[in-house]
Image: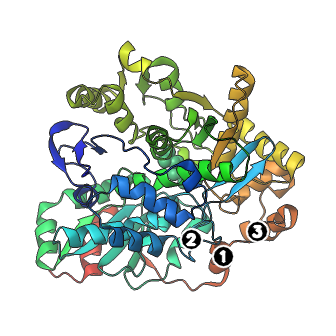
Amino acid sequence: MNLLYKSTRNNENTVTASQAILKGLADDGGLFVPERIPKLDVSMDELKKMSYQETAYEVMKLFLTDFTEEELKHCIDSAYDSKFDTDVIAPLVKVGDTYHLELFHGATIAFKDMALSILPHLLTTAAKKNNVTDEIVILTATSGDTGKAALAGFADVPGTKIIVFYPKGGVSRVQELQMVTQKGENTAVVAIHGNFDNAQSGVKALFEDRELESELAEAGYRFSSANSINIGRLVPQVVYYVYAYAKLLENEEIVSGEEINVTVPTGNFGNILAAYYAKQMGVPFAKLICASNENKVLFDFFRTGVYDRNREFILTSSPSMDILISSNLERLIYTIAGQDSEKNRDLMAQLKETGSYEITPEMREKLGDFEGGYATEEETKETIRTTYEHTGYVMDTHTAVAAHVCAQYRKDSQDPAKCLIASTASPYKFIHSVMTAIDGKYDGADEFDLVDELSRISGMEVPNAIEEIRNADIRHRKECDPENMKDTVKEILGIRG
Ligand SMILES: *Cc1c(COP(=O)(O)O)cnc(C)c1O
Protein backbone atom coordinates (compact mmCIF):
# COMPACT_ATOMS: atom_id res chain seq x y z
CA MET A 1 0.00 0.00 0.00
CA ASN A 2 1.22 3.47 -0.80
CA LEU A 3 2.13 5.52 2.29
CA LEU A 4 1.78 9.27 1.87
CA TYR A 5 3.17 12.12 3.93
CA LYS A 6 1.55 15.30 5.15
CA SER A 7 2.72 18.44 6.87
CA THR A 8 2.37 18.83 10.65
CA ARG A 9 0.92 22.30 9.91
CA ASN A 10 -1.54 21.45 7.16
CA ASN A 11 -3.48 18.19 6.80
CA GLU A 12 -4.76 19.02 3.31
CA ASN A 13 -1.83 18.33 1.02
CA THR A 14 -0.13 15.00 0.75
CA VAL A 15 3.17 14.14 -0.93
CA THR A 16 4.97 10.90 -1.68
CA ALA A 17 7.96 9.79 0.37
CA SER A 18 10.39 10.78 -2.39
CA GLN A 19 8.82 14.24 -2.66
CA ALA A 20 9.04 14.67 1.12
CA ILE A 21 12.74 13.78 1.02
CA LEU A 22 13.38 16.20 -1.85
CA LYS A 23 11.57 19.08 -0.15
CA GLY A 24 12.89 18.50 3.38
CA LEU A 25 10.54 21.02 4.97
CA ALA A 26 6.92 21.54 3.87
CA ASP A 27 6.06 24.88 2.22
CA ASP A 28 4.03 25.91 5.28
CA GLY A 29 7.10 25.46 7.52
CA GLY A 30 5.76 22.17 8.93
CA LEU A 31 7.53 18.82 9.08
CA PHE A 32 6.48 15.88 6.94
CA VAL A 33 4.94 12.96 8.81
CA PRO A 34 3.66 9.63 7.48
CA GLU A 35 -0.15 9.38 7.50
CA ARG A 36 0.24 6.36 9.76
CA ILE A 37 3.14 4.39 11.21
CA PRO A 38 3.35 1.07 9.34
CA LYS A 39 3.53 -2.23 11.26
CA LEU A 40 6.47 -4.58 10.73
CA ASP A 41 5.36 -7.36 8.37
CA VAL A 42 8.10 -9.84 9.27
CA SER A 43 8.40 -11.54 12.67
CA MET A 44 11.19 -10.96 15.18
CA ASP A 45 12.19 -14.59 14.61
CA GLU A 46 12.86 -13.74 10.98
CA LEU A 47 14.45 -10.38 11.79
CA LYS A 48 16.88 -11.82 14.29
CA LYS A 49 18.66 -13.75 11.55
CA MET A 50 18.98 -10.72 9.27
CA SER A 51 22.01 -8.54 8.57
CA TYR A 52 21.85 -4.80 9.18
CA GLN A 53 21.25 -4.20 5.48
CA GLU A 54 18.44 -6.76 5.30
CA THR A 55 16.80 -5.25 8.38
CA ALA A 56 17.13 -1.79 6.84
CA TYR A 57 15.25 -2.98 3.77
CA GLU A 58 12.43 -4.53 5.82
CA VAL A 59 11.93 -1.30 7.78
CA MET A 60 12.51 1.30 5.07
CA LYS A 61 10.33 -0.37 2.41
CA LEU A 62 7.34 0.22 4.71
CA PHE A 63 8.00 3.96 4.95
CA LEU A 64 9.37 4.75 1.49
CA THR A 65 6.71 2.98 -0.54
CA ASP A 66 7.37 4.78 -3.82
CA PHE A 67 10.96 3.49 -3.97
CA THR A 68 11.36 0.22 -5.87
CA GLU A 69 13.04 -2.74 -4.20
CA GLU A 70 16.04 -2.27 -6.47
CA GLU A 71 16.33 1.46 -5.70
CA LEU A 72 16.07 0.97 -1.97
CA LYS A 73 18.54 -1.90 -1.86
CA HIS A 74 20.96 0.14 -3.94
CA CYS A 75 20.71 3.05 -1.46
CA ILE A 76 21.17 0.71 1.52
CA ASP A 77 24.15 -1.13 0.04
CA SER A 78 25.84 2.13 -0.99
CA ALA A 79 25.49 3.49 2.54
CA TYR A 80 26.20 0.62 4.91
CA ASP A 81 29.43 -0.70 3.44
CA SER A 82 33.13 -0.54 4.32
CA LYS A 83 32.74 3.09 5.43
CA PHE A 84 31.73 1.40 8.69
CA ASP A 85 34.52 -0.27 10.63
CA THR A 86 32.41 -3.32 11.52
CA ASP A 87 30.28 -5.68 9.40
CA VAL A 88 27.46 -5.54 11.92
CA ILE A 89 27.27 -1.72 11.43
CA ALA A 90 25.72 -1.06 14.86
CA PRO A 91 27.20 -3.42 17.47
CA LEU A 92 25.60 -4.15 20.85
CA VAL A 93 27.91 -4.16 23.85
CA LYS A 94 26.87 -5.29 27.31
CA VAL A 95 28.17 -2.83 29.90
CA GLY A 96 27.31 -3.71 33.50
CA ASP A 97 23.56 -4.31 33.46
CA THR A 98 22.76 -2.30 30.32
CA TYR A 99 23.18 -2.79 26.58
CA HIS A 100 24.94 -0.09 24.61
CA LEU A 101 23.91 0.16 20.97
CA GLU A 102 27.04 1.66 19.42
CA LEU A 103 25.98 3.99 16.63
CA PHE A 104 29.47 5.42 16.07
CA HIS A 105 31.19 3.00 13.73
CA GLY A 106 30.75 5.10 10.56
CA ALA A 107 33.00 7.57 8.77
CA THR A 108 32.88 10.36 11.37
CA ILE A 109 32.54 8.18 14.49
CA ALA A 110 29.21 9.64 15.64
CA PHE A 111 25.59 8.62 15.25
CA LYS A 112 24.74 11.14 12.50
CA ASP A 113 26.59 8.81 10.11
CA MET A 114 23.76 6.28 10.48
CA ALA A 115 21.44 8.58 8.53
CA LEU A 116 23.83 10.84 6.62
CA SER A 117 25.51 7.92 4.90
CA ILE A 118 22.23 6.97 3.22
CA LEU A 119 20.54 10.38 2.78
CA PRO A 120 22.58 11.36 -0.32
CA HIS A 121 21.49 8.17 -2.07
CA LEU A 122 17.86 8.59 -1.05
CA LEU A 123 18.01 12.20 -2.25
CA THR A 124 19.53 11.47 -5.67
CA THR A 125 17.12 8.56 -6.17
CA ALA A 126 14.21 10.81 -5.18
CA ALA A 127 15.42 13.43 -7.68
CA LYS A 128 15.46 10.89 -10.51
CA LYS A 129 12.00 9.59 -9.60
CA ASN A 130 10.60 13.11 -9.76
CA ASN A 131 12.39 14.01 -13.00
CA VAL A 132 14.58 16.58 -11.31
CA THR A 133 17.65 16.89 -13.51
CA ASP A 134 19.35 19.76 -11.69
CA GLU A 135 22.45 19.00 -9.70
CA ILE A 136 21.64 19.11 -5.97
CA VAL A 137 23.69 21.54 -3.90
CA ILE A 138 23.66 20.83 -0.17
CA LEU A 139 24.25 23.92 1.97
CA THR A 140 24.97 23.41 5.65
CA ALA A 141 26.06 25.53 8.58
CA THR A 142 27.67 23.47 11.29
CA SER A 143 28.85 23.84 14.86
CA GLY A 144 31.06 20.82 14.31
CA ASP A 145 29.44 17.40 14.00
CA THR A 146 26.78 17.57 11.32
CA GLY A 147 29.02 19.30 8.78
CA LYS A 148 31.59 16.55 8.73
CA ALA A 149 29.00 13.76 8.67
CA ALA A 150 27.26 15.46 5.73
CA LEU A 151 30.56 15.99 3.89
CA ALA A 152 31.48 12.34 4.35
CA GLY A 153 28.03 11.23 3.19
CA PHE A 154 27.90 13.38 0.06
CA ALA A 155 31.57 13.18 -0.99
CA ASP A 156 31.77 12.01 -4.60
CA VAL A 157 28.06 11.11 -4.79
CA PRO A 158 27.23 11.81 -8.47
CA GLY A 159 24.68 14.57 -9.05
CA THR A 160 25.48 16.41 -5.81
CA LYS A 161 27.73 19.14 -4.45
CA ILE A 162 28.11 20.08 -0.82
CA ILE A 163 29.19 23.38 0.75
CA VAL A 164 29.73 23.55 4.51
CA PHE A 165 30.19 26.75 6.52
CA TYR A 166 31.67 26.62 10.02
CA PRO A 167 32.64 29.34 12.51
CA LYS A 168 36.40 29.92 12.43
CA GLY A 169 37.66 29.26 15.96
CA GLY A 170 34.24 27.95 17.02
CA VAL A 171 34.85 24.22 16.58
CA SER A 172 37.33 21.84 18.22
CA ARG A 173 40.71 21.16 16.63
CA VAL A 174 39.73 17.61 15.71
CA GLN A 175 36.44 18.83 14.21
CA GLU A 176 38.16 21.50 12.12
CA LEU A 177 40.81 19.05 10.87
CA GLN A 178 38.11 16.53 10.03
CA MET A 179 36.40 19.09 7.80
CA VAL A 180 39.33 20.84 6.11
CA THR A 181 40.94 17.53 5.13
CA GLN A 182 37.71 16.22 3.53
CA LYS A 183 38.28 14.52 0.19
CA GLY A 184 35.86 14.52 -2.75
CA GLU A 185 35.79 16.71 -5.84
CA ASN A 186 32.26 17.90 -5.03
CA THR A 187 33.03 19.13 -1.50
CA ALA A 188 33.73 22.67 -0.28
CA VAL A 189 34.37 23.88 3.26
CA VAL A 190 34.42 27.55 4.22
CA ALA A 191 35.43 29.12 7.55
CA ILE A 192 33.25 32.08 8.51
CA HIS A 193 34.69 35.06 10.38
CA GLY A 194 31.89 34.95 12.92
CA ASN A 195 30.03 32.57 15.21
CA PHE A 196 27.70 29.65 14.50
CA ASP A 197 24.63 31.92 14.50
CA ASN A 198 26.19 34.06 11.74
CA ALA A 199 26.85 30.95 9.68
CA GLN A 200 23.35 29.59 10.25
CA SER A 201 21.53 32.85 9.53
CA GLY A 202 23.70 33.26 6.43
CA VAL A 203 22.71 29.83 5.11
CA LYS A 204 19.06 30.48 5.90
CA ALA A 205 19.22 33.75 3.94
CA LEU A 206 20.72 31.93 0.95
CA PHE A 207 17.89 29.38 1.02
CA GLU A 208 15.34 32.22 1.00
CA ASP A 209 17.08 34.27 -1.73
CA ARG A 210 14.79 33.97 -4.77
CA GLU A 211 17.20 35.82 -7.08
CA LEU A 212 19.95 33.35 -6.22
CA GLU A 213 17.49 30.51 -6.74
CA SER A 214 16.85 31.53 -10.34
CA GLU A 215 20.53 32.13 -11.03
CA LEU A 216 21.18 28.63 -9.73
CA ALA A 217 18.37 27.14 -11.82
CA GLU A 218 19.86 28.74 -14.94
CA ALA A 219 23.16 27.08 -14.18
CA GLY A 220 21.42 23.72 -13.53
CA TYR A 221 21.60 23.67 -9.73
CA ARG A 222 19.11 23.56 -6.90
CA PHE A 223 19.66 23.89 -3.16
CA SER A 224 18.71 21.21 -0.69
CA SER A 225 19.40 20.69 3.00
CA ALA A 226 20.69 17.73 4.96
CA ASN A 227 18.85 18.98 8.04
CA SER A 228 17.78 16.50 10.72
CA ILE A 229 14.10 17.17 10.11
CA ASN A 230 14.24 15.46 6.70
CA ILE A 231 12.31 12.18 6.81
CA GLY A 232 15.22 10.79 4.79
CA ARG A 233 17.20 11.09 8.00
CA LEU A 234 14.47 9.96 10.39
CA VAL A 235 13.45 6.72 8.65
CA PRO A 236 16.98 5.20 8.52
CA GLN A 237 17.21 5.82 12.27
CA VAL A 238 14.23 3.56 12.97
CA VAL A 239 16.22 0.65 11.53
CA TYR A 240 18.78 0.31 14.31
CA TYR A 241 16.14 0.06 17.02
CA VAL A 242 14.48 -2.84 15.23
CA TYR A 243 17.90 -4.38 14.62
CA ALA A 244 18.98 -3.98 18.26
CA TYR A 245 15.88 -5.68 19.63
CA ALA A 246 16.21 -8.55 17.15
CA LYS A 247 19.88 -9.04 18.05
CA LEU A 248 19.17 -9.06 21.81
CA LEU A 249 16.71 -11.84 21.05
CA GLU A 250 19.19 -13.68 18.84
CA ASN A 251 21.84 -13.46 21.58
CA GLU A 252 19.30 -14.78 24.12
CA GLU A 253 19.69 -11.71 26.29
CA ILE A 254 15.90 -11.35 26.25
CA VAL A 255 13.01 -13.72 25.57
CA SER A 256 10.45 -13.37 22.82
CA GLY A 257 8.05 -10.49 23.47
CA GLU A 258 9.99 -9.20 26.50
CA GLU A 259 9.56 -5.46 26.95
CA ILE A 260 12.70 -3.39 27.38
CA ASN A 261 13.35 0.31 28.00
CA VAL A 262 15.39 2.55 25.74
CA THR A 263 17.40 5.59 26.85
CA VAL A 264 18.45 8.13 24.22
CA PRO A 265 20.75 11.14 24.69
CA THR A 266 18.65 13.83 23.10
CA GLY A 267 19.15 17.19 21.40
CA ASN A 268 16.91 17.77 18.40
CA PHE A 269 14.62 14.85 19.37
CA GLY A 270 15.31 12.96 16.13
CA ASN A 271 16.96 9.87 17.55
CA ILE A 272 14.39 9.26 20.27
CA LEU A 273 11.52 9.93 17.87
CA ALA A 274 12.88 7.10 15.73
CA ALA A 275 12.67 4.82 18.80
CA TYR A 276 9.05 5.92 19.26
CA TYR A 277 8.31 5.03 15.63
CA ALA A 278 10.00 1.63 16.15
CA LYS A 279 7.73 1.03 19.14
CA GLN A 280 4.68 1.90 17.07
CA MET A 281 5.85 -0.50 14.37
CA GLY A 282 5.59 -3.27 16.95
CA VAL A 283 8.99 -3.47 18.66
CA PRO A 284 8.35 -4.34 22.35
CA PHE A 285 9.75 -1.17 23.90
CA ALA A 286 8.22 -0.08 27.21
CA LYS A 287 9.59 3.32 28.29
CA LEU A 288 11.42 5.71 26.01
CA ILE A 289 13.69 7.65 28.32
CA CYS A 290 14.71 11.05 27.04
CA ALA A 291 18.10 12.10 28.46
CA SER A 292 19.15 15.77 28.44
CA ASN A 293 22.27 17.56 29.60
CA GLU A 294 22.04 20.81 31.60
CA ASN A 295 20.04 22.34 28.72
CA LYS A 296 17.08 20.41 30.10
CA VAL A 297 14.16 21.93 28.15
CA LEU A 298 12.84 18.46 27.34
CA PHE A 299 13.11 17.18 30.91
CA ASP A 300 11.04 20.18 32.04
CA PHE A 301 8.58 19.61 29.21
CA PHE A 302 7.90 15.98 30.16
CA ARG A 303 7.59 16.96 33.83
CA THR A 304 5.30 19.98 33.42
CA GLY A 305 3.76 19.97 29.95
CA VAL A 306 5.34 23.38 29.31
CA TYR A 307 7.99 23.81 26.63
CA ASP A 308 10.01 26.90 27.45
CA ARG A 309 13.13 27.94 25.60
CA ASN A 310 13.47 31.20 27.53
CA ARG A 311 16.48 30.27 29.57
CA GLU A 312 20.22 30.55 29.61
CA PHE A 313 22.02 28.53 26.95
CA ILE A 314 24.64 26.40 28.68
CA LEU A 315 27.80 25.18 26.95
CA THR A 316 28.38 21.61 28.12
CA SER A 317 30.80 18.77 27.42
CA SER A 318 28.06 17.16 25.27
CA PRO A 319 27.81 19.97 22.67
CA SER A 320 25.65 18.04 20.19
CA MET A 321 22.89 18.18 22.80
CA ASP A 322 23.26 21.89 23.56
CA ILE A 323 19.94 22.76 21.97
CA LEU A 324 17.01 24.85 23.17
CA ILE A 325 14.66 24.23 20.25
CA SER A 326 14.26 20.52 19.58
CA SER A 327 12.83 20.76 16.10
CA ASN A 328 11.73 17.13 15.76
CA LEU A 329 9.53 17.43 18.86
CA GLU A 330 6.95 19.03 16.55
CA ARG A 331 6.23 15.58 15.11
CA LEU A 332 5.39 14.25 18.59
CA ILE A 333 3.28 17.32 19.41
CA TYR A 334 1.30 16.78 16.22
CA THR A 335 0.76 13.11 17.09
CA ILE A 336 -0.41 13.73 20.66
CA ALA A 337 -2.67 16.51 19.40
CA GLY A 338 -4.50 13.71 17.56
CA GLN A 339 -2.90 14.67 14.20
CA ASP A 340 -4.56 18.04 14.51
CA SER A 341 -2.47 20.32 12.32
CA GLU A 342 -4.29 23.46 13.40
CA LYS A 343 -3.62 22.86 17.08
CA ASN A 344 0.02 22.09 16.32
CA ARG A 345 0.34 25.22 14.19
CA ASP A 346 -0.97 27.36 17.06
CA LEU A 347 1.52 25.91 19.52
CA MET A 348 4.41 26.39 17.09
CA ALA A 349 3.31 30.00 16.49
CA GLN A 350 3.36 30.55 20.28
CA LEU A 351 6.85 29.06 20.43
CA LYS A 352 8.02 31.44 17.74
CA GLU A 353 6.41 34.50 19.29
CA THR A 354 6.92 33.93 23.00
CA GLY A 355 9.48 31.13 23.19
CA SER A 356 7.11 28.80 25.02
CA TYR A 357 3.84 26.87 24.88
CA GLU A 358 1.83 24.56 27.12
CA ILE A 359 0.11 21.40 25.93
CA THR A 360 -3.38 20.41 27.11
CA PRO A 361 -4.04 17.78 29.83
CA GLU A 362 -5.43 15.43 27.12
CA MET A 363 -2.18 15.74 25.19
CA ARG A 364 -0.13 15.09 28.33
CA GLU A 365 -2.00 11.84 28.89
CA LYS A 366 -0.64 10.58 25.60
CA LEU A 367 2.96 11.01 26.72
CA GLY A 368 2.88 7.84 28.83
CA ASP A 369 5.55 6.14 26.71
CA PHE A 370 8.10 8.80 27.68
CA GLU A 371 10.19 9.54 30.74
CA GLY A 372 12.54 12.50 31.02
CA GLY A 373 15.79 12.86 32.92
CA TYR A 374 18.97 14.90 32.85
CA ALA A 375 22.58 14.77 33.92
CA THR A 376 24.67 17.64 35.26
CA GLU A 377 28.23 18.09 34.05
CA GLU A 378 29.48 16.55 37.31
CA GLU A 379 27.18 13.51 36.94
CA THR A 380 28.29 13.03 33.34
CA LYS A 381 31.96 12.95 34.32
CA GLU A 382 31.25 10.71 37.28
CA THR A 383 29.44 8.22 35.02
CA ILE A 384 32.37 8.06 32.60
CA ARG A 385 34.87 7.56 35.41
CA THR A 386 32.99 5.00 37.50
CA THR A 387 31.94 2.96 34.45
CA TYR A 388 35.55 2.84 33.36
CA GLU A 389 36.70 1.86 36.85
CA HIS A 390 34.10 -0.87 37.25
CA THR A 391 33.98 -2.34 33.74
CA GLY A 392 36.92 -0.98 31.70
CA TYR A 393 34.45 0.42 29.14
CA VAL A 394 35.02 4.02 28.05
CA MET A 395 32.03 5.99 26.79
CA ASP A 396 31.71 9.47 25.34
CA THR A 397 30.08 12.42 27.10
CA HIS A 398 26.74 12.25 25.22
CA THR A 399 26.35 8.55 25.95
CA ALA A 400 27.29 9.18 29.58
CA VAL A 401 24.37 11.60 29.92
CA ALA A 402 22.07 8.74 28.85
CA ALA A 403 23.81 6.18 31.06
CA HIS A 404 23.37 8.43 34.08
CA VAL A 405 19.70 9.10 33.33
CA CYS A 406 19.06 5.39 32.76
CA ALA A 407 20.61 4.45 36.12
CA GLN A 408 18.74 7.24 37.89
CA TYR A 409 15.43 6.13 36.38
CA ARG A 410 16.02 2.52 37.50
CA LYS A 411 16.83 3.61 41.01
CA ASP A 412 13.84 5.93 41.32
CA SER A 413 11.25 3.70 39.65
CA GLN A 414 12.50 0.23 40.63
CA ASP A 415 11.46 -0.73 37.10
CA PRO A 416 13.14 -4.11 36.51
CA ALA A 417 13.00 -3.96 32.67
CA LYS A 418 16.29 -4.32 30.83
CA CYS A 419 17.63 -1.19 29.25
CA LEU A 420 19.11 -0.34 25.86
CA ILE A 421 21.24 2.81 25.65
CA ALA A 422 21.80 4.60 22.36
CA SER A 423 25.54 5.25 22.33
CA THR A 424 25.96 8.20 20.01
CA ALA A 425 29.66 8.99 19.73
CA SER A 426 33.04 7.34 20.01
CA PRO A 427 35.02 8.48 23.07
CA TYR A 428 37.78 9.41 20.60
CA LYS A 429 35.58 12.17 19.23
CA PHE A 430 35.28 14.04 22.55
CA ILE A 431 38.58 12.83 23.86
CA HIS A 432 39.59 15.77 26.02
CA SER A 433 36.37 15.73 28.07
CA VAL A 434 36.40 11.95 28.29
CA MET A 435 40.01 11.65 29.44
CA THR A 436 39.79 14.44 32.02
CA ALA A 437 36.64 12.79 33.41
CA ILE A 438 38.68 9.64 33.93
CA ASP A 439 41.65 11.45 35.45
CA GLY A 440 42.18 15.16 36.04
CA LYS A 441 45.86 14.80 35.16
CA TYR A 442 44.98 14.82 31.43
CA ASP A 443 43.68 18.38 31.59
CA GLY A 444 45.48 20.63 29.13
CA ALA A 445 47.10 17.74 27.23
CA ASP A 446 47.30 17.78 23.43
CA GLU A 447 44.27 16.01 21.88
CA PHE A 448 46.43 13.82 19.70
CA ASP A 449 48.64 12.71 22.59
CA LEU A 450 45.47 11.63 24.39
CA VAL A 451 44.52 9.42 21.44
CA ASP A 452 47.29 6.95 22.18
CA GLU A 453 46.62 7.15 25.88
CA LEU A 454 42.91 6.30 25.39
CA SER A 455 43.85 3.39 23.19
CA ARG A 456 46.22 2.15 25.88
CA ILE A 457 43.79 2.35 28.81
CA SER A 458 40.69 1.10 26.95
CA GLY A 459 42.18 -1.43 24.54
CA MET A 460 39.96 0.13 21.83
CA GLU A 461 41.70 0.48 18.50
CA VAL A 462 42.23 4.05 17.27
CA PRO A 463 39.48 4.58 14.66
CA ASN A 464 40.38 5.31 11.06
CA ALA A 465 38.60 8.65 11.28
CA ILE A 466 41.25 9.78 13.79
CA GLU A 467 44.28 8.14 12.13
CA GLU A 468 43.34 9.80 8.84
CA ILE A 469 43.36 13.37 10.09
CA ARG A 470 46.68 12.97 11.86
CA ASN A 471 48.56 13.02 8.57
CA ALA A 472 46.04 14.14 5.96
CA ASP A 473 46.64 17.17 3.72
CA ILE A 474 44.61 20.31 4.25
CA ARG A 475 42.38 20.60 1.18
CA HIS A 476 40.08 23.47 2.13
CA ARG A 477 41.41 26.93 3.01
CA LYS A 478 38.57 29.23 1.99
CA GLU A 479 37.43 31.83 4.52
CA CYS A 480 34.87 34.62 4.24
CA ASP A 481 32.95 37.27 6.14
CA PRO A 482 29.29 36.47 6.81
CA GLU A 483 28.25 39.25 4.33
CA ASN A 484 30.10 37.51 1.52
CA MET A 485 28.60 34.05 1.77
CA LYS A 486 26.50 34.53 -1.36
CA ASP A 487 29.48 35.51 -3.50
CA THR A 488 31.46 32.63 -2.07
CA VAL A 489 28.75 30.13 -3.01
CA LYS A 490 28.57 31.54 -6.54
CA GLU A 491 32.32 31.39 -6.89
CA ILE A 492 32.39 27.75 -5.74
CA LEU A 493 29.64 26.85 -8.22
CA GLY A 494 31.24 28.87 -11.01
CA ILE A 495 28.24 31.19 -11.44
CA ARG A 496 29.04 34.64 -12.85
CA GLY A 497 27.29 37.91 -12.19
C1 LIG B 1 23.15 14.86 17.22
C2 LIG B 1 23.66 14.12 18.41
C3 LIG B 1 22.82 13.81 19.50
C4 LIG B 1 21.38 14.25 19.58
O1 LIG B 1 20.55 13.57 18.69
P1 LIG B 1 19.13 14.20 18.29
O2 LIG B 1 18.61 13.33 17.22
O3 LIG B 1 19.42 15.60 17.83
O4 LIG B 1 18.30 14.17 19.52
C5 LIG B 1 23.37 13.08 20.56
N1 LIG B 1 24.66 12.70 20.56
C6 LIG B 1 25.50 12.99 19.53
C7 LIG B 1 26.92 12.56 19.60
C8 LIG B 1 25.02 13.70 18.41
O5 LIG B 1 25.87 13.99 17.41
Question: Picture coordinates of residue 340 (x, y %)?
Answer: 24, 28
Q: Which residue is mark 1?
A: 464
Q: Residue at x 23, y 26 (%)?
A: 346
Mark 1 to mark 3 CA distance (whole Å): 12 Å
- Point out the frontmost of discs 1 and 3: 1
- Mark 2 vs mark 3: in front: 2
Which residue: 81% across, 53% down?
393
Q: Secondary structure at mark 2?
A: loop
Q: Is mark 2 within 8 Å of ligand 1?
A: no
**Rendered residue at 81%/67% (across/down):** 455
Give the class, few, some or many, for how many residues have Cα within 10 Å of label 1's Cα (few <14, many ≥20): some
The reply, left or right, for residue 265 in relation to residue 118 is right
The label on residue 124 is none
* Amino acid identity at mark 1: Asn
Q: Where residue 210 sits: x, y (%)?
A: 12, 61
- Marking on residue 451: 3
The correct choice, above or below, for 313 with respect to 363 in the image is below
433 left or right of 150 in image? right
Total residue callouts: 3
* In-front residue for pair 167/449: 449
Give the spatial CA distance, label 2 vs label 3: 17 Å
SS under mark 1: helix
How far is mark 1 from mark 2, CA to CA?
A: 8 Å
Q: Earlier in the sequence, mark 1 or mark 3?
A: 3
Q: Which mark is residue 107?
A: 2
Q: Is residue 240 left or right of residue 381?
A: left
Quadrant, the C terminus: bottom left
Badge 2 amino acid: Ala
